Image (tube, coloured by chain):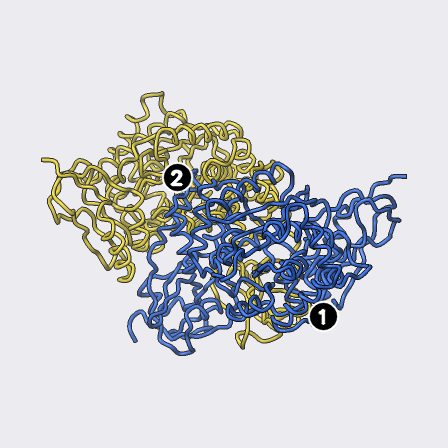
Chain colours: A blue, B yellow
Amino acid sequence: MLHNELKARRLGIDTYRERVVFMRYDCPVCRAEGFRSMGRVRVSLGERSVIATLDVVQGNLLGGDEIGFSEAAWNALGAHDGDCVRIFHPDTLDSFSAVRNKIYGGRFSQSDLHNIVRDLTAGRYSSIEIAAFITACAGDRMSTEETIALTQAMVDSGTRLAWPQHPVVDKHCVGGLPGNRTTPILVPIVAACGLTIPKTSSRAITSPAGTADTMEVLAPVDLTLEHMRRVVEREGGCVVWGGSMALSPADDLLIQVERPLDFDSTGQLTASILSKKLSAGSSHLLIDMPVGPTAKVRDDKAAAALRARLLAVGEAVGLKLRVVCSDGLQPVGRGIGPALEALDVLAVLRCDAAAPQDLRERALLLAGHLLELGGKAADGEGLGLAARTLDSGAAWDKFQAICTAQGGLREPGRAAHRLPVTAARSGVVTRIDNRRLARVAKLAGAPMAPAAGVELLARLGQRVAADEPVYLIHAEAPGELDYAANYAGSRPDIIHVEDIP
Amino acid sequence: MLHNELKARRLGIDTYRERVVFMRYDCPVCRAEGFRSMGRVRVSLGERSVIATLDVVQGNLLGGDEIGFSEAAWNALGAHDGDCVRIFHPDTLDSFSAVRNKIYGGRFSQSDLHNIVRDLTAGRYSSIEIAAFITACAGDRMSTEETIALTQAMVDSGTRLAWPQHPVVDKHCVGGLPGNRTTPILVPIVAACGLTIPKTSSRAITSPAGTADTMEVLAPVDLTLEHMRRVVEREGGCVVWGGSMALSPADDLLIQVERPLDFDSTGQLTASILSKKLSAGSSHLLIDMPVGPTAKVRDDKAAAALRARLLAVGEAVGLKLRVVCSDGLQPVGRGIGPALEALDVLAVLRCDAAAPQDLRERALLLAGHLLELGGKAADGEGLGLAARTLDSGAAWDKFQAICTAQGGLREPGRAAHRLPVTAARSGVVTRIDNRRLARVAKLAGAPMAPAAGVELLARLGQRVAADEPVYLIHAEAPGELDYAANYAGSRPDIIHVEDIP
């Protein structure tokens, strides 16, 4: 074996997206090359090569001639146990000096962001380097020019879909409002009206459920590009997970670190949204922006800033945009979490009398805007067309057809463990803390545990009695139920009740 | 075993400072508690408890009733193989919401920083959360008030030494200037003049060598507090590593992540310096601030800002400060890296004719200021006293006595591998890129490989012939020599030579 060769061994350690390799501190390669823990190494096998973070190992976990791989590193290299791989020092990560410069108050040039996104996509950034980049861009530290450049760089980093149809409409919700699951309702409405809407959705970033997480409860969303094309060709629309399409792959890597950090930023949010939509081949995009003190967009000032940023960047990259600001004071529907939200979606599509009206109205409002944006209705007439399409059952038929085409409609599962949270006093519900309610749902296991989450029983303005349940926690595991319950118990003000006679 | 109990097993995986535990995806605890990779868990054994990042494991690395530990997690918990430990969901990290708020443009309150530093010190922050905090504070994003609060919080997080003597003087170099190793020279000078200088130094953050790294080549620096007290009592001074004293331990955790990220910030730099000095019990502090385009402090504007911040915070926390701005245009002495710098130090202390004059002059200048600050010389007379103390041999005698008291003076080792880097053309050296030269030394293995680094052969203004060596790379491992040589080869302008007739 050469001086820098070791035998590959899959350790089966799942370090999430981060690529990690393990070597004995006393192995010939560590000794010769002077590698140390938390250092970065390049491991190559034939033509393929990955940059990974090194953990140095003592004891007998590995042989002296072996190199261990985390799952992410193993899959990226495509090695087999026993393969001889070569280990090198990686080239210095020059693009990170632009991140440093940004942190010191500089600006990103177009080529800075191109190089950063290229290195990100190639897996050359460690998770702490990604965390630093995300933080450097957070708040409103990205200018419009920087955001345009980041958006373009992210589009260039992956596949870009092209569709024969025109226009190709799309919709995105800025999020931050639990349960705001309008997409699976409006897609069949506008598709039934003849618009083309190949909807690729993301999984949750910092919320208890992304549209893809919720839709996955109802039908397969992890489709190949070919399969997605067939669905859209036949039904005019789909609701699939965009992650498997390699659309804006850099965005997915950023999301992996944003999730535990639990924050987004104007610039990154804009680039994330628009790069995904551009890559998906959309020509017309409707953006739903809920605004409220505990929504992701907290007030009109923040909404105006994000709206302006989205419109400016959208125009620069050639997307026809309409931004609708909606009320973000309280969750939409009753369910928070994939399965619980899916139940609300089904109720609205089936026109159940008990269906949450607020979800129905939001979906119709947005579908109306989309029909106008896409030229199927004159301004002011979209809402009526949307309502007729839903009430006639055409939307429900279309939804079932889409689910069938995606692999089959299925019923949401129920959580094994539930716990009611009661009002601390009698009175009127005057505030709902969406962020903390979402936190309860996340602590209960959402979105990775699909049936977990929160079932909201009280609405703003509703009168409740002391000890009356205001929401139910659903969990798949008892430990998660306790965890969420402890958090909820220590914050009784999540549903704020005032003593109003 | 209880539903949340597993058997502890030391895996011998060195994840540096980050605490990581490993569990099988199908172990009862993961199933019951719904733990997932990159999640955070609390592991407790009797009274002790650690928060760690979880890596989920497939395959046979672990038994279903076992939990594996990284070295950092193992040492923090103090477990033994086979101990039954209990695994919990950690409390939510409330202090991190203050980091989020800061990133969104808010300010840290005193209690925010107190809580953040408390959680940091307790090991509750993952490395990506630390990276986000560091980035949020980077550049000049910390106000003076925030810096004062951070400094106090860092002091409160650890031990604070008290000394019977007064004044207790200290010196710190803001760094960024390779080879600027004046401390081991000025400590014996001022101690020989009767001042008390219990010098605790740090290891390198982003430089090829910290004072502690260099001093360790000459004598043990990893002393217990009691041992350090004896040295100071007998000799009036010492040069030891502060890390083992638990002075401002939060600072050390921040440094572990700053190192790979390779950036500092005004606020954090100020808090890092002053918290260490306050904790060390200093009353009078001299700060050496090299200024130059490629030094850490790049120009007079940056110097003025940092100087003002240091003075303001110093006054607020009760430290008598003097800040001396010095020339940061080129490295000091010849050596860059622990052993190479130690050789320069010995030459100056021994008054060798061949000793680097620039290092000698800097050390004398600073020693003079310290003698004035500490009241051993009138203003303007410190330099003369310092020079007499060095030339009389009194400083060299004192240095040997200090080394003996610390555990014995030893000679620096030499690197096994060397490579000359030659001038690209003939002419005059008009610029030296300190940052890239330091990078070469780091790629060669400094500071962890003590004999590695760069030996500078050319100075500013010196005339060199084409292909004349301008510096030597020293490395302990051939791989590191190649790595540094490749980097140096791709940046021939590190020593800029102009064709001046």
Front one among A164 and B464: A164
Read off the residue under disc 1: A411
| Numbered badge on residue A11 | none
- Residue at the extreme bottom of the image, as rendered: A82
* Residue B342 in view (yes/no): no
Read off the residue under disc 2: B235
CA gap between label 2 and label 1 equals 80 Å
Location of residue B452 in the rendering, given as x and y in whole percent from the top left corner = 29, 54
Residue at figure coordinates x 19%, y 45% from the top left = B457
Q: Amino acid at mark 2?
A: Glu
Location of residue B483 in the rendering, given as x and y in whole percent from the top left corner = 28, 58
Q: Seen in the image, is A355 located left or right of residue B351?
A: right
What count of labels does the image hold? 2
Front one among B174 and A323: A323
Front one among B364 and A438: A438
Q: Mark 2 — on which chain does it sit?
A: B
Location of residue A345 in the rendering, given as x and y in whole percent from the top left corner = 71, 61
Q: Mark 1 — on which chain does it sit?
A: A
Vertical side of A272 occupied by B30: above or below: below
Q: Seen in the image, is B171 located left or right of residue A425?
A: left
Vertical side of B287 occupied by B240: above or below: below
- Residue at the extreme right of the image, as rendered: A501
Location of residue A209 in the rendering, given as x and y in whole percent from the top left corner = 65, 58
Residue at figure coordinates x 59%, y 51% from the top left = A375
**Which secondary structure lies at badge 2?**
helix
Q: Amino acid at mark 1?
A: Glu
- Residue at the extreme left of the image, as rendered: B501
Vertical side of A2 occupied by A116: above or below: above
Residue at figure coordinates x 43%, y 39% from the top left = A104
